[in-house]
Image (cartoon, helix red, strand yellow):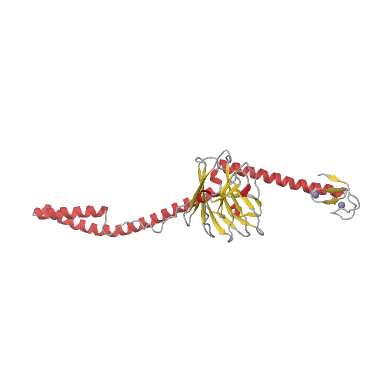
Amino acid sequence: MASVKVNRSLCSICGKVPSLSFCVGCQRVFCTDHVEQHRLELSTLLDKIILEHGQCKQTIIQYTEESNSHPLMKQINEWEKQSIEKIQQVAVDARKQVLNAFAYFASNAITTIKNLTEELTKAQNEDNFFESDLKQWMDTLIKIKKELDKPPTINIRKGGTDVPFISKIMVSVSEIFEKSAGRISIKDEGKLIVNIGSNGYGTVRSKGEYSTGKHRFRFKIEHTSTHKWNLIGIVSKNSSLQATAYNTPTSFGWIANNFVCLNGKLFSDFNGYKSDIEKNDIIELFIDCNRHTIRLTNERTHYTHELTIDAALCPFPWQIQLGLYYAKDRIRLLWR
Ligand SMILES: [Zn+2]
Ligand SMILES: [Zn+2]
């Protein structure tokens, strides 16, 4: 703790003894006794932070090495367990039903067999049977044998596919906004950007960085002013974040006022670009690092526009960059 001597102020803890030390951290003054106490308070807090830090590190190691201990994994395991239990219960019930129905069927079959036994014994003893008798007995036996495997009174069928018995589990992975500059605020755990206060430029960038492959993102225009100014595009990670995305070097993207931003410069009517963004539209941004292109598509109108990025002007890695200007404008990043 850096301390300088000040005069005439009383200690901020006891309020009695004139203070000798000033803490630049909390801007308070302390007497000789209480400066020690204050120092102790600070070091106790530091100990707590060190403990918390160690626990964080431990948690990362645990989740990496024993992935099954992760809460998300537990959620999947729980779904798996419940689904299996559901199947097992239905199988138990179905077996019980078949057993009951088969017992009833079998008792009838036993009666038929008993009658046949009598007839066969009689025929053997009296030796008075003919071809027609043999055929009848054989037919009866064939029928019983066939029906034992597939009793005509019992049927098993699978349920309709319209309502799935077990709902499929799906994992969604999403980008988030992480850093902002200017009159813009990141909300909903990085999923929503909002222009705060009155009109004024604000910029956000994604947490993710992209250097290879193809990546697709969807945004919902939750609010846009009638004048329409929002920028959707990319920027090189190396370029420093500023509130005015449209003149940030390495910025490429589309603005809803019909301007295209190419390397931090604005062009109107570029390759026929004309924005048709309205409130509640869902806009797709497709980044193809391999082809060095980005593409904007309005899902409502299917209007699409592509820009080719000169990687010499906009070096990898790229980040998603969005900008807002008008008060209360909001854009939400959707799950993929
Ligand atoms: Zn004191
Ligand atoms: Zn202090």
Q: Is residue 41 above or below residue 196?
A: above
| Whether residue 304 can be seen here | yes
- In the rendered image, residue 124, in percent from the top left (x then y), is placed at 12, 52
Q: Which residue is painted at 53% across and 45% down in the image?
A: 68
Q: Is residue 70 above or below residue 282?
A: above
- The residue closer to the viewer here, 3 or 317, is 317
Within the image, what quadrant is residue 167 found in? bottom left
- In the rendered image, residue 57, in percent from the top left (x then y), is placed at 64, 42
| Whether residue 233 can be seen here | no
Q: Which residue is painted at 85% across and 48% down in the image?
A: 22
- The residue closer to the viewer here, 199 or 114, is 199
Instruction: Tell whether 247 sits left or right of 215.
Output: right
- In the rendered image, residue 93, in percent from the top left (x then y), is placed at 38, 57
- In the rendered image, residue 305, in percent from the top left (x then y), is placed at 50, 50
Instruction: Tell whether 25 sits left or right of 67.
Output: right
Could you tell me which quadrant the N terminus lies in? top right
Within the image, what quadrant is residue 61 found in? top right
Q: Which residue is painted at 22% across and 59% down in the image?
A: 111
Residue furthest front in the image: 269
